[in-house]
């Protein structure tokens, strides 16, 4: 998705859920403020929502990033979460609803031999991708994170509030071109979205 993370990835950026509405909050100084449970402030800035998505949201699916040739196991795992309401709306309409948030948690891996064979398991968080659905184009003219019906952002493991993404088109879109026909999301990796 972002060339700065892993240029070979063809994976989905995470959407965080319907509860992430576009807020009109202020920090008391006239500046846009982000509700910590939301993914978007009133200027279109995106953050990783301050919720326990592992416990309270639904896991859409997991992507295993293959290790380099000749190396056993996986080089990383990407687990994607969204709110239950997003899944219900998608199953009803076949579309991601406005306000839907996808959170892709990027995890390192540890590989070991076990009784079942060579396995890779998730280890430390390496970062997050967050996508927020907005078919209205509310922020497209004023914020470089928005376009093609989505807000796009990457966050390193040390900061879930400030994205390093400045231009979704140059940093995100290229990895999603093969998924253009499914609203830029690799839905085939998410069994819960199938009827």
Image: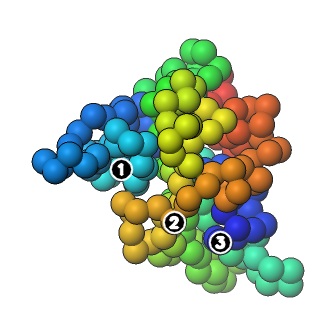
Question: Of callouts 1 and 3, which one flags the residue occurring earlier in the amino acid sequence?
Answer: 3
Per the image, label 2 sits on a secondary structure element best described as loop
Residue at figure coordinates x 20%, y 46% from the top left: 30
**Quadrant housing the N terminus:** bottom right
What residue is rendered at 68% in x and 75% in y? 75
Q: Is residue 190 left or right of residue 142?
A: right
Q: CA distance from mark 1 to mark 3?
A: 22 Å
Q: Is residue 156 left or right of residue 169?
A: left
Pointers 3 and 2 in contact (C-beta within 8 Å): yes
How far apart are labels 1 and 2 at the CA level? 16 Å
Q: In the rendered structure, which disc, 3 or 2, sits on the residue that comes first in sequence? A: 3
Residue at numbered disc 2: 164
Q: Is residue 118 above or below residue 50?
A: below
Task: Check disc 1 and report the residue beneath it.
Answer: 49
Structural crowding at the residue carrying mark 2, measured as other residues with C-alpha within 10 Å and reported as few (<14), some (14–19) or many (≥20):
some
Q: Quadrant of residue 72?
A: bottom right
Classify residue 26 by image quadrant. top left
């Amino acid at each position: 998705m972002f060339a700065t993370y892993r240029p070979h990835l063809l994976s989905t950026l995470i959407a965080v859920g319907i509860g992430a509405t576009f807020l009109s909050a202020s920090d008391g100084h006239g500046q846009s403020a982000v509700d910590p449970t939301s993914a978007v402030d009133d200027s279109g800035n995106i953050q990783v929502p301050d919720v326990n998505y592992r416990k309270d949201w639904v896991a859409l699916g997991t992507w295993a990033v293959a290790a380099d040739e000749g190396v056993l196991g996986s080089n990383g795992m990407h687990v994607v979460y969204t709110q239950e309401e997003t899944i219900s709306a998608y199953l009803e309409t076949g579309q991601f609803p406005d306000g839907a948030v996808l959170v892709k948690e990027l995890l390192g891996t540890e590989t070991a031999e076990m009784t079942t064979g060579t396995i890779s398991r998730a280890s430390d968080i390496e970062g997050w991708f967050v996508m927020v659905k907005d078919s209205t184009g509310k922020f497209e003219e004023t914020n470089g994170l928005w376009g093609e019906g989505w807000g796009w952002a990457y966050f390193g493991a040390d900061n879930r509030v400030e994205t390093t993404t400045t231009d979704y088109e140059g940093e995100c879109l290229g990895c999603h071109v093969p998924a253009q026909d499914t609203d830029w999301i690799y839905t085939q990796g998410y069994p819960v979205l199938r009827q």
